[in-house]
Image (spheres, grey):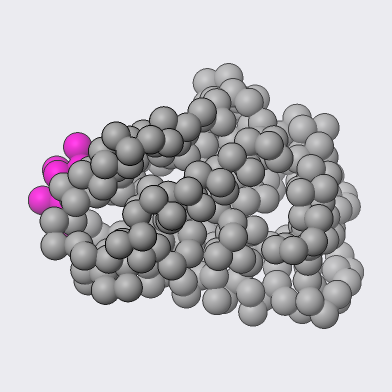
Amino acid sequence: MNDTAIQDVRARFLAILPDFNDFENPPQVLIDNELDYKRAAAKKARSILEEFVDNRAKLSTDGEARKVLFEVIELTNFLSWRDRVYLDGQLFSEDGMWIEFGNMLFDCLRETPDGNWQEALQKILDWLVSKNSWFSVTKILPTYFLFLWDPTRHFCVKSRFTDRFLKLLGVKPLGQGKPLTVDGYQRVLQTCDDLRSAIPDWKLRDNIDVHSLAWLVAGGWSDVSRPDRPTDTDPKPDGEEKPPVVQELHRPKIPLNLILAAL
């Protein structure tokens, strides 16, 4: 990350939100379309998960594990409908898989921020790779839960979006067609910390603010109607599934002039 890259990111963001001053007093369009729903999701996710993380309640069945985890997944549209079909229909289709993943996840969340969450995350990543998970899912699935559980420290890694953001800042991307590594994820977190330090006048309070900044400058608002797909080198399910029936998800209603400005 260098000064030129930081200034470019600032300029890109201000081209989309010219009336922006800082994240303590953001424009209403940013509150409505990015900040409020992410903060509400983080608060709700913690209320759902704390019974299992802080109070160490045990999952009794696969159905219970799936229900708890999907309740958190459905708080946002971060995981696409393809991701959800893949989790249910392929990755976690065998008996015991939801419980096994859930228990590893809760162990990881319990270690953040000051424990050895890196070792717990490595265990999850090794497990996902052993199950031939889509590489994009190794990135978004564990980091999504980490982000909502502890947005002051963690960041949700959505494969293409995160790589675009890293490249804008002159940071080595994670790379398409590769599973997430702990080292790669720590590089993302360090980039978030460095960015918050590099632009103190913008008063980035946590990684919800960083994630929202990153989403805009990486073209997220212009991509809002395009469904996410696994990368060409990711393992894929056979055939093309239909979208699952899920509850209504947050989908920002972005004014047309702002979408055009982001292109």
The answer to whether one can see residue 242 in this image is: no
The location of residue 215, given as percent across then percent down, is 37, 48
- Residue sitting at 46 percent across and 71 percent down? 39
- Residue sitting at 63 percent across and 43 percent down? 186
Location of residue 44 by image quarter:
bottom right
Q: Quadrant of the N terminus?
A: top left
Give the residue furthest to the left: 257
Task: Answer left or right for 209 relative to 126.
Answer: left
Please tell me how many numbered marks the rendered image carries: 0
The answer to whether one can see residue 235 in this image is: yes
- Residue sitting at 51 percent across and 28 percent down? 172
Q: Main secondary structure of the magenta part?
A: helix
The vertical placement of 75 against 170, above or below, is below
The vertical placement of 18 against 7, above or below, is below
The location of residue 148, given as percent across then percent down, is 58, 64
The location of residue 18, given as percent across then percent down, is 13, 56
Q: Quadrant of the C terminus?
A: top left
Task: Answer left or right for 46 relative to 172.
Answer: right
Q: Is residue 257 magenta?
A: yes
The vertical placement of 86 against 197, above or below, is above
Q: Which residues are magenta?
A: 255-263
Task: Answer left or right for 250 relative to 189.
Answer: left
Question: Residue 45 versus residue 17: which sits nearer the camera?
Answer: 17
Question: Residue 46 versus residue 79: which sits nearer the camera?
Answer: 46
Give the residue furthest to the top: 233
